[in-house]
Image: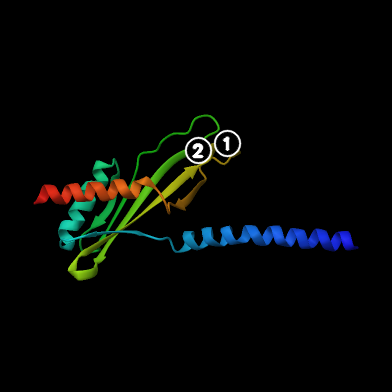
Amino acid sequence: MKQISLLLATLALLLGAGCKSNIANLREHINPTYHDVIVETDEDTAFAAARTALVQMGYKITSSGVAQKKIEAISAISSGDMGRAARQVSASVRFGVGPDNTTAIQILFTEILEDSGRNRDGMATKQPLRESGLYGVFEKYVNEALTAKK
């Protein structure tokens, strides 16, 4: 009986340890964290710069509107090799007022994977990218677009 209790306690501990990361992943999936790029310009100019940056990064604009203050874009599909997933990245951009009369460009990249190795063709998973070099590249291209406008 003691062995069963010990086994159950160990199992509960292991499950509890894994839950912390699962809860963080679930929270990020439900309410993802957008990355801010603060620029010293008006929203219309920031919108044009963000759109230009996404196009330079190879994204196709799927939806955009200055009045809606948002841009949606998607990358090309990188096909997976044998046993590897096909990958695509979407970008969601929104705009707001930043500190000291600046514009806040908020961007979120989301990875879309289709795993062909498990007989689940057509099924994909989406995961917001919390840390990615894409955010730095986007900011660089936004700043270049703004410098070119001056």
Residue extending furthest toward the right = 1
Q: SS for tag 2?
A: loop
Q: Relative to 14, is 110 on the left or the right?
A: left
Q: Relative to 40, is 83 on the left or the right?
A: right
Q: Relative to 73, is 17 on the left or the right?
A: right
Residue assigned mark 2: 85
Q: Amino acid at mark 1?
A: Gly
Q: Position of residue 40 (x, y in %)?
A: 17, 61
Of residues 68 and 87, which is closer to you in this image? 87
Residue extending furthest toward the top = 82
Residue extending furthest toward the left = 150
Residue assigned mark 1: 117
| Total numbered labels placed on residues in the image | 2
Q: Residues within 10 Å of mark 1 (few under 14, many from 20)?
A: few
Q: Position of residue 145 (x, y in %)?
A: 17, 48
Q: SS for tag 1?
A: helix
Of residues 27 and 150, which is closer to you in this image? 150
